[in-house]
């Protein structure tokens, strides 16, 4: 039976039901596209979400060795593009719908995630390592050798991988 | 004070909205499931009676004169609520040649309810906030 019919029949039998919100609990569908959450451990600051966001809600800036991933809800249209294109699954839309904010909060109504760089074990250069989520997506089996390589900056990693091939 | 407990009137204007927000707003106002009038406010058909103005849409060039007319007719004090991402920041329509928004260019906005469209409960949240601000404004006016 379609959802609509179910509700219509229930209303016929029990009378219309007013949602108790804001005085009580409300019903939230699991698939509701509400405010989003960024997992800084999985994010690699690749910038894909910033690129695909149709409303320019996401900005990734760099402060000394830390990437700051900011989403401004007041312009987000909750389309879910960022979640769809994120290669690591770091950004997810939750079903939190509480978006009402006062004008004073307008430009502070954001979510911020900090993605830190690490030091390359070989040359000491700072870089953002591939996250575990990205490795899982790229390789069928993530073993220790692969994990070792993520501690090296892209340049050193290339060198090391090449050496390994011809040793 | 009796004037504070009086039911504030809500007035809504569509400034070129895609209808998404209007459907949610109509849902919030009219169907018994959400029923925003439980908060003690009533809808009115005239901006001259309005205490709380609800605006949907990104202020298209064609709708701008109507918005300005409504803003002119509002009695003081009034509270402005931007419903949806469009009036708040123009969202995906930002920088379009036919868009003259966001709303804050024309009037001091009090509450923003972003969402494309916002969920009825979020609109209720926004109206509840607006009611608080309205009471505060009435108190300060005296
Ligand atoms: S949900 Fe859409 S609009 Fe919101 S941040 Fe993601 S891509 Fe941008
Ligand atoms: S959230 Fe995903 S798409 Fe956005 S920068 Fe992080 S890893 Fe890239
Ligand atoms: S915020 Fe979204 S749903 Fe509302 S009017 Fe704008 S485009 Fe339509």
Image (cartoon, rainbow, N blue to C red):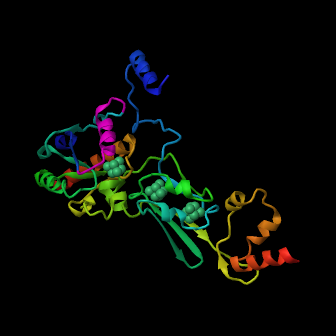
The C terminus of chain A lies in quadrant: bottom right
Q: Which residue lies furthest to the right in this view?
A: A167
Image vertical order of residue B47 relative to residue A46, above or below? above
Q: Tell me which residue sits at (64%, 74%) in the image.
A: A117
Q: Which residue lies furthest to the top in this view?
A: A13
Q: Does the magenta stretch include residue B16?
A: yes
State the residue in front, A6 or B112: A6
Residue A75 pos. (x, y %): 39, 58
Image vertical order of residue A42 relative to residue B130, above or below? below
| Start-end of magenta stretch | B15-33
Q: Tell me which residue sits at (68%, 59%) in the image.
A: A133
Left/right placement of residue B5 relative to residue A55 reads left
Q: Tell me which residue sits at (40%, 32%) in the image.
A: A19
State the residue in front, A84 or A89: A84
Number of numbered discs overlaid on the protein picture: 0
Image vertical order of residue A16 relative to residue A43, above or below? above
Q: Is residue B61 magenta?
A: no
Q: Tell me which residue sits at (39%, 17%) in the image.
A: A12
Where is residue A10, by image quadrant?
Answer: top left
Q: Residue furthest bottom?
A: A123
Q: Does the image show residue B142?
A: no
Residue B96 pos. (x, y %): 30, 62
Residue A141 pos. (x, y %): 79, 57
């Amino acid at each position: 039976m379609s959802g609509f019919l179910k509700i219509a029949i229930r209303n016929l039998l029990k009378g219309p039901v007013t949602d108790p919100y804001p005085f009580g609990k409300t019903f939230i569908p699991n698939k509701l596209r509400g405010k989003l959450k960024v997992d800084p451990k999985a994010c690699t600051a690749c910038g894909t979400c910033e690129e695909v966001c149709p409303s320019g809600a996401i900005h990734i800036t760099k402060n000394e060795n830390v990437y700051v991933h900011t989403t401004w809800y007041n312009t987000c249209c909750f389309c879910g593009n960022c979640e769809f294109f994120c290669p690591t699954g770091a950004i997810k839309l939750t079903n939190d719908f509480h978006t009402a904010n006062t004008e004073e909060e307008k430009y502070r109504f954001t979510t911020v995630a900090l993605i830190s760089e690490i030091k390359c074990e070989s040359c000491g250069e700072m870089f953002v390592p591939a996250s575990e989520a990205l490795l899982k997506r790229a390789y069928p089996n993530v073993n220790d050798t692969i994990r070792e390589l993520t501690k090296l900056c892209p340049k050193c990693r290339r060198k090391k991988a090449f050496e390994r091939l011809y040793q | 004070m009796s004037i504070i407990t009086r039911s504030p009137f809500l007035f809504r204007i569509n400034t070129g909205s895609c209808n998404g927000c209007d459907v949610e707003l109509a849902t919030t106002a009219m169907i018994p499931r959400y029923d925003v009038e439980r908060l003690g406010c009533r809808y009115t058909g005239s901006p001259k009676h309005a205490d709380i103005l609800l605006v949907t849409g990104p202020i298209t060039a064609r709708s701008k004169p109507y918005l300005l007319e409504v803003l002119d007719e509002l009695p003081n004090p009034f509270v402005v609520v931007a419903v949806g991402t469009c009036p708040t920041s123009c969202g995906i329509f930002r920088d379009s040649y036919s868009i003259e928004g966001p709303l804050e260019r024309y009037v001091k906005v009090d509450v923003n309810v972003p969402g494309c469209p916002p969920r009825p409960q979020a609109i209720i949240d926004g109206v509840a906030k607006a009611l608080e601000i309205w009471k505060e404004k009435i108190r300060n006016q005296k």
